[in-house]
Image (cartoon, grey):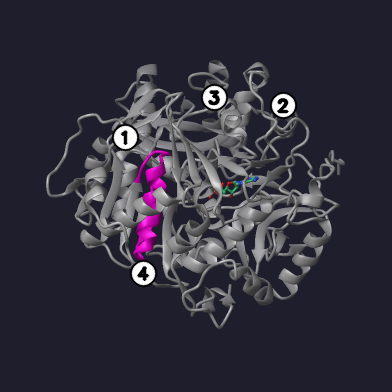
Amino acid sequence: MVQSEVYPVPPGFAAQAHIDAAAYERLYRWSIEDPDGFWQKEAAFLDWIKPFTEVSDTSFDVNDFRVRWFADGTLNGSVNCIDRHLAEKADKPAVFWESDMPGESRVVTWGELADKVNRLANVLKSLGVGKGDVVAIYLPVIPEVMVAMMATIRIGAVHTVVFSGFSAESLENRIADSKAKVLITADEGFRGGRISPLKRNADDAVRNQPSIEHVIVVRRSGAEVPFTPGRDLWYDEATDAAEPWCEPVEVGAEDPLFILYTSGSTGKPKGLVHTTAGYLVHAGTSWRIIFDWHEGDVFWSTADVGWVTAHSYKLYGPLLNGATTVMFEGVPSWPDASRWWSIIEKHGVNIFYTAPTALRSLMREGEAPVRKHDLSSLRVLGSVGEPINPEAWRWFHSVIGGGRCPIVDNYWQTETGAVTLVPIPGAIPNKPGMAAKPYFGIRPEVVSPEGVTLEGPADGNMCFRGSWPGQARTILHDHERFLKTYFAPFPGRFFSGDGVTRDEDGYYRIAGRVDDVINVSGHRLGTVELESAIASHPAVAESAVVGYNHDVKGQGVFAYVTLKADAAETDELRREITRWVRARISPIASPDIIQWAPALPKNRAGKILRRILLKIANNDFSDFGDTSTLADAAVVEDIVARRKAEL
Ligand code: 6R9
C-alpha cells in the first residue's frame, strides 16, 4: 500500500484544542468499553425537563430491532437551542446573513431570533398544529428557515425541510408522504442573480395535497405572487400579530424531531426519522469537538438548509452551542469567484465548512480571486459530502487555509444523524482524502461481501457495529425497508451503502457508494429515481443511468436512453429530456450526457448490466469482464460504436 502524505496537527493547535491525541485515545476507549457511561456524560450537555433513568436499549437484530436512547427523559429542543443562551447573549449576534445580492446583509441577535421563534410558534398553534404534526419548510438560505425549524419543534411538531432547488413535483411527493399540515415558503428565492418562483411551485405542490391546511409565505423579494385567502398567510403579518411568548412543549426523548428525505437505491425518496434527545446530543456535542469551536468563534457552513449537513452542522450544532454563524443565500461564483472569500474576510470567519465539488470549481478560477482577500481569521477548515480528492485537499489546505488550518474531513450520512469518521483537529494528523478515525462511540467495521469483518489494512463495505444516539430510527411509514436496507445486508451491523479502505495506521478512506446511488456535487441521487423520471417522458421507452467520473461534480449523470419507435434521436429531444428531468426532480439531477441506445445490455432475466454501462460511460472500452450472461452481445458493440462516434 502506498504511504500517503501526513500533515501533523499544526504547532500550538493541540494545546488550545478541546481534544488532543491523549484525550482522543482515552475518551474513544471509554466510549467503546462503556458506551452508556460515555453518552450519559455527553447527555448532560442538554437541559432536560425530566432527566432520563436509562441510557440505552438497543439491538440491531432485525427480528428484535430496538434503538432507544435516554428514553424516559423529557425536554424541548428549542429551549436547548435558544432560550438557554438568552441570559448571556440576547444582544449578541446569532446569525450574520449575507444576501445573494452583494452589499445586502442582516444581523440577527439571539433575542430577535427568540422573539420570532415564539411568535411563529404561536401562529402555528393557532393554525391547529400540535405535537407530532408535520410542518414542511421550503425556504432559501435565509434566517427565517432557522425560525421556522425552531418554532416547529417548540410546539412538539416535526419539521421536514425540502431543498428550495427542488421542483414542485419533488416537493409534492414529500408532502404527500409526510402528510404535512402546514407549508412554510417564500414568495421568491434568489441564487446567483436568478429568481426562483417558490410560491408558484408551492401552489403547484399543494394543489392536490389535502393534508396541507395552510401556507405561510415569507416576503423575500416582495414580488406579487398568487395568494389564496383563507389558506395562505403572510409570515410578517402573522408573526407581528402573534404573542411574543409561547410555552415550550415537553416532548419525550424518543419523540420525532424531524423527517429528512434522501435518495435511495429504489425509486422513492425515503423519509428518515430523527428523534429528539439522541440526535441533539450527538449533533450538539460532536459539532463543538470536531470543529474545535470556542466561545467567540464565527462559524460558516456553506451547505443548503435542505441537506442533513445543514441540519446538524449549520443549524442544530451551532444553535445548541450558542455559536455565531454566517448564512449565505447565494452561490460561490456570483457575481464573481471571490464571493465566498469576501464573506470570510468581512465576518472574520474562523471555521469554514464546505464541500469538495465547490472547491474543485473554485480551484479552476486560480488563486487570484482568493488573494484579493484576507483569510487570516481562518483556523479550522471542514469538508463533507463526498470523498475529497488529494488535489482539492491540498488546494484547500495551502491556498485557503494558508497551510496552517487542519482539515476536518467528516464522513457521515442522513441516516447517521451526525459524524461517524473524522480527524478531530487537535488529535489526529491529516492524510488528504481520508476521513481518518472513528468519532466517539462509533465502531467502524470493514466487512467483506460475504459478511466477514476484516482486520488490519483492508477494502470492503463500510459498516458500524452497535448503536449511537444520533442514528435515524426508521423510514417514515416503512420500517421494513429501513431494516432491509441498513441492517439485513450484514447482520448485527448498520450498513452505510459505501465502500471503504482502511490503511496500516487504521485510517479510513471512503471509496464512494456501492449501491445504486450516485453522488453528484455532494448530493445523493438514486439512479432508479432518475431512470423513472426519464422514462416518464412520452418519447422514451427505457433508460439506464450511471454516475461517471466528472472533474468538478465528482460524479455526473450519464443516461442511456432508448426511444420509442416513432421518436427521432435529435439534439432537441436531448434538451427536452434534460428540461423534463429538471422539472421533475431538480436541476441537480440534470443528465450531463444523454447517450441514445437502441437497446440496453441485459441478462437473460432482463436485468440491466450496469457494470458494462459504467465502463462505457467512463470511456473505458477495453474489457467488459464476463459478458456470457448477456442476452444479446451485439447490443454492447452497438452502444460502444455509438459512444466512440460521439467522442
Ligand atoms: C453528510 C452527508 C451521505 C453520503 C455518504 C457518502 C458521502 C459524505 C463524506 C462522504 C466521503 C466524506 N459522503 N461525507 N464520502 N467522505 N467526508 O453528506 O449526508 O447527504 O446523506 O450523503 O455522502 O457516500 O454515504 P448525505
Q: Quadrant of residue 205?
A: top left
x then y, percent, for residue 442: 68, 63
Q: In what element is the residue under mark 1?
A: loop
Q: In what element is the residue under mark 2?
A: helix
Three-letter code, disc 4: Val
Three-letter code, disc 1: Arg
Q: In 3D space, how far apart are the residues under numbered discs 4 and 3 (Cα atoms)?
A: 41 Å
Q: Earlier in the sequence, mark 2 or mark 4?
A: 4
Q: In 3D space, how far apart are the residues under numbered discs 3 and 1 (Cα atoms)?
A: 21 Å
Q: Nearer the viewer, residue 121 or 56?
A: 121
Q: Are marks 2 and 1 in contact (CB under 8 Å)?
A: no
Q: Quadrant of residue 197?
A: top left
x then y, percent, for residue 123: 25, 56
Q: Residues within 10 Å of mark 3 (few under 14, many from 20)?
A: some
Which residue, given by chain and number where applicable, does mark 4 sit on? 249
Q: In 3D space, how far apart are the residues under numbered discs 4 and 1 (Cα atoms)?
A: 30 Å
Three-letter code, disc 2: Val
Residue under the point 67% across and 55% down: 289
x then y, percent, for residue 344: 59, 31
Three-letter code, disc 3: Arg
Q: Residues within 10 Å of mark 2 (few under 14, many from 20)?
A: some
x then y, percent, for residue 409: 68, 45
Which residue, given by chain and number where applicable, does mark 1 sit on? 220
Q: Earlier in the sequence, mark 3 or mark 1?
A: 1
Q: Earlier in the sequence, mark 2 or mark 1?
A: 1
Which span is picked out in magenta? 138-162
The answer to whether residue 549 is seen in the rendering is no
Q: Residues within 10 Å of mark 1 (few under 14, many from 20)?
A: some
